[in-house]
Image (cartoon, rainbow, N blue to C red):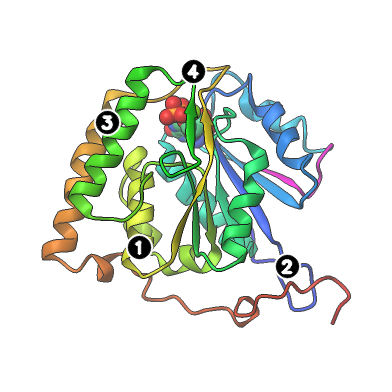
Amino acid sequence: MPKFENKPGSIILEKIVIIPTFNEKENIEKIIHAVINLNLGYHILIIDDSSPDGTAQLVKSLFSTFPGQLFLEERHGKQGLGTAYIHGFRWALEKGYRYIFEMDADFSHNPSDLERLYQACASGADVAVGSRYIKGGAVANWPANRILLSKGASLYTRIITWMPIKDPTAGFVCYRREVLENINLDNISFVGYAFQIEMKFAAWKLGFKVKEVPITFIDRQEGVSKMNKGIIKEGVWGVLELRWQSMFKNYRNRVINKSYNPTPMFAHKTSILEGEN
Ligand SMILES: Nc1nc2c(ncn2[C@@H]2O[C@H](COP(=O)(O)OP(=O)(O)O)[C@@H](O)[C@H]2O)c(=O)[nH]1
Ligand SMILES: [Mg+2]
């Protein structure tokens, strides 16, 4: 794990987009270019689970084009989306990033929408969720069975948990670092899409302000989805488990990071730029 690099007077690292990948060779270079070409200061961290198709090699081939902006963490074997993000969150917190994003590699999430999530967080939200199911949001060319599954999962989650979020399985998210620092990431237990629900549930239960921002989600054009029955099963049981824990045990106590100590340099809103001290 790299050492914490921010020192007073040095550049505060602002925005990092974490992209988990498993066999995304058709998309990976294009999505990296698309995010960096926004020219809005986004850094990218790819978490690759030893993709047999050589995704990680393609990322490495871009290191010299985007020095200091593109990073890669390689893990051994496919370990699931949730643990990939947890790995990325720890990495980004350790480095000192202030806004930490989740995004898929497959262009289902439009990189141009990153800034709308960022603006929502920069103007008062703690978590900004790119939402398909609020006014102005949409899903384009997803097969009917996937739409039904996704909408069904959202309704099911809301009925069971009462969490006031219309798109709880959304995977296009911006977190203020304080949210991730406050959550005990050791106790986030799910690996698949239930992970997305649990992160929002934890943030909501800890009293953070979650704002949904409408987005249009587009089905992937290239590569294949990693959705499977195990992920659906984990989602169904996972939501019940969250509800159970929050009813009879103190979920808040379980999920709060008791050793969280805010770093004073992150307690204010203004960026410290190099040479300004
Ligand atoms: N590192 C890692 N990434 C994964 C894993 N499973 C899925 N992903 C990535 O997570 C993102 C979302 O997965 P995807 O297959 O598009 O799911 P879908 O959009 O629900 O069909 C993509 O960028 C995948 O490459 C995994 O086990 N490990
Ligand atoms: Mg996808």
Residue 269 rendering spot, x and y as whole percentages: 66, 75
Q: Which residues are magenta?
A: 65-71
First of labels 4, 3 by sequence position = 4
Q: Secondary structure at mark 1?
A: helix
User: Which numbered mark, 1 or 3, is in the foreground of this view?
Assistant: 1
Q: CA distance from mark 4 to mark 3?
A: 17 Å
- Disc 3 marks a residue whose amino acid type is Ile
Task: Identify which residue is drawn at 61% across, 35% down.
Answer: 110
Residue with the mark numbered 2: 12
Nearest to N terminus: mark 4 or mark 1? 1
The residue that appears at 43% across and 42% down in the rendered structure is 170
Dot 3 falls on a residue whose secondary structure is helix
Q: CA distance from mark 4 to mark 1?
A: 32 Å
Q: How many C-alpha atoms fall within 10 Å of the one at disc 2: few (<14), some, or many (≥20)?
A: many
In the rendered image, the residue lying farthest to the front is 135
Q: Which residue is mark 1?
A: 204
Nearest to the eye among marks 4 and 1: give it. Answer: 1
Point out the tag, 1 or 3, that comes first from the N-terminus: 1
N-term-proximal mark, 3 vs 2: 2
The amino acid beneath tag 1 is: Trp
Whole-angstrom CA distance, mark 1 to mark 3, is 23 Å
Do labels 2 and 4 touch, CB within 8 Å?
A: no
The residue beneath circle 3 is 232
The residue where tag 4 is placed is 224
The image quarter in which residue 263 lies: bottom right
CB-based contact (under 8 Å), mark 2 and mark 1? no
* Image coords of residue 6 (percent x, y): 71, 70
Q: Earlier in the sequence, mark 2 or mark 4?
A: 2
